[in-house]
Image: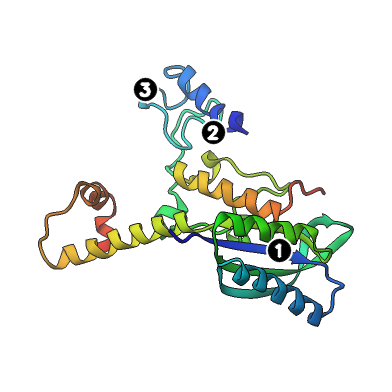
Amino acid sequence: MERFYEVMFIVRPDTQDEEVDKLIAGFEATVTNGGGAVRSTEKLGRRKLAYMVRKFNEGNYILMTIDADGVLVHELERRLRVSEPVIKFITVRMDEEQKRLDKVRAIRATRKKLSAQPVPAPPVEAAEAPAEATPASA
Amino acid sequence: MADETTTPRAPEGAAPTGGPGGPRGPRTGGPGGPGGRKFFRRKKVCKFCTEKIDAIPYRDVRLLQQFVAERGKIVPRRLTGVCTTHQRRLTKAIKQARNIALLPFAARY
């Protein structure tokens, strides 16, 4: 059962780029050493913060998607909390959401095929079909 | 926070005959909005349902900002016409965005 999470954290704006890269590499190492895998790392760049955080009005946003279990995420959060350049972070669990999205997309895909050939539809599709049949067929 | 979602329902339930749009029953954005208006406000459609947007990510600030008032407060669904499921997801996303300083908790001026 693989869970995957999205971790977004903000680094102080006055840190150099190499330091930011070193930080990210450190966190990625934590994840891989703990038995997880890093799916992707994205640097969203400098942004103006909506409110002042630790006397800063700007921050470097970084988004990491990782495959990990709860224990590893706990450890990663501990490191984020302790590391000085990171001023804020949030971890969001994405696997349940992804499962739901895949289910909805699968239902939509089968519904499209329904219009091509007659297939007995399960009750979920029948309930959704009258509401959304017109946009699907249009 | 729970009070905000339940209070609009209460006047609709309490004034079924006396309120505007009377015997038609509670509708989204109809009798709940303007006080004492006789006619039905035209039914607003949920933006997410029509555009088939499944997931509302907290990162999408521009999308979320459409549902946030000037002072940073979340706009009630009777004004925006969003359906309940999407309003709940939207609220969750806005609160996540606030936590990561993408949206303000309270904006002044």
Q: Are marks 1 and 3 in contact (CB under 8 Å)?
A: no
Q: Residue B33 — which label? A: 2
Q: Chain of mark 3?
A: B
Left or right of A137 on screen, residue A2: right
Q: Chain of mark 1?
A: A
- From this view, report whether residue A72 is shown above or below residue A19: above
At which x and y percent is residue B89? Answer: 51, 48
Q: What residue sits 62% from the left and 58% below the top? A: A73
Report which residue position mark 3 lands on: B23
Left or right of B85 on screen, residue A128: left
Query: Label 1 crowding class (10 Å Cα cut-off): few <14, some 14-19, many 20+?
Result: many
Q: Secondary structure at mark 3?
A: helix
Query: Label 3 crowding class (10 Å Cα cut-off): few <14, some 14-19, many 20+?
Result: few
Report which residue position mark 1 lands on: A9
Q: What residue sits 79% from the left and 82% below the top? A: A18
Q: Are marks 2 and 1 in contact (CB under 8 Å)?
A: no
At which x and y percent is residue B70? Answer: 71, 49
Count of numbered circles on the image = 3
At which x and y percent is residue B80? Answer: 53, 46
State the CA–CA distance, disc 2 to disc 1: 39 Å
State the CA–CA distance, disc 1 to disc 3: 52 Å
Asked whether the viewer can see residue B52, the reply is no
State the CA–CA distance, disc 3 to disc 2: 16 Å
Q: Residue A33 — which label? A: none
Left or right of B57 on screen, residue B85: left
Residue extending farthest left: A118
- Say which amino acid is labelled 3: Pro
